[in-house]
Amino acid sequence: MATWILIGLIVIVGLMVVSAIGIYNGLVNRRVRTENAWSQIDVQLKRRYDLIPNLVETVKGYAAHERQTLENVIQARNMAVSAKTVAEHAQAENLLTGALKSLFAVSEAYPDLKANVNFRALQEELTATENRIGFARQHYNDTAAQYNAALQRFPGNLVAGMFGFQPADYFQLDAGEAEAVRRAPQVKF
């Protein structure tokens, strides 16, 4: 009788170990997918950062007295390039987006600049890159949500706690930009 109890305990402990290994490996896979999703954002951001100096140089030739706007774009780009964490990247990207909006607003005042082939090509490339960044952000946030949910569900939360898994940050809009996006646009004729 004692041997059956011992065999039963060994089987139960063995099943718990196998289950813990499976949960651990699942969490590792989700963390790696989340890191990969972030690297996809990073690739698109790098592409964006590479386009911005060319765009600024093109604008400089036409709008030399718009120095402050150009400096703001370069400063925002440098902040974004040096960001380390997801939260720092999100904050820097929000500043860069605002600076680029100002730059494109400046271009409206210069018809020759708007007609410039290089400027238009760079603007179109930057727009396409912005779209890619948007899709990459969405994919990253979806992947981070799946990973974070796995960390919180039982029994994954036990394994995550034992091995020090940390939740992933989301790539979010800042409060002002989020509010602007939520408001309905006003159309005036």
Image: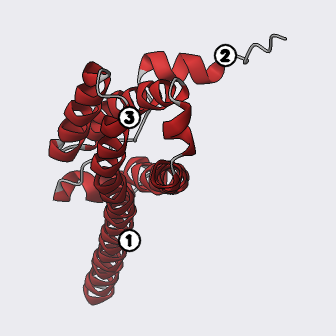
Question: Tag 3: residue type?
Answer: Tyr
Residue at mark 3? 62
Q: Is residue 179 left or right of residue 92?
A: right
| Gap in angstroms between the C-alphas marked 1 and 3 | 55 Å
Mark whose residue sits in front, 1 or 3: 3
Between discs 3 and 2, the one toward the N terminus: 3
Q: Residue at x 73, y 17 (%)?
A: 184
Task: Look at mark 1 in the image and give the residue it sits on.
Answer: 26
Quadrant in which the N terminus appears: bottom left
Q: CA distance from mark 1 to mark 2?
A: 40 Å
Q: Quadrant of the C terminus?
A: top right
User: Mark 3 to mark 2: distance in Å?
Assistant: 34 Å
Q: Which residue is mark 2?
A: 183
- Dot 2: element: loop
Res 20 → quadrant: bottom left
Q: Position of residue 67 (x, y in %)?
A: 25, 23
Task: Give the class, few, some or many, for how many residues have Cα within 10 Å of label 1's Cα (few <14, many ≥20).
Answer: some
The residue closer to the viewer here, 136 or 140, is 136
Q: Position of residue 75 (x, y in %)?
A: 20, 31
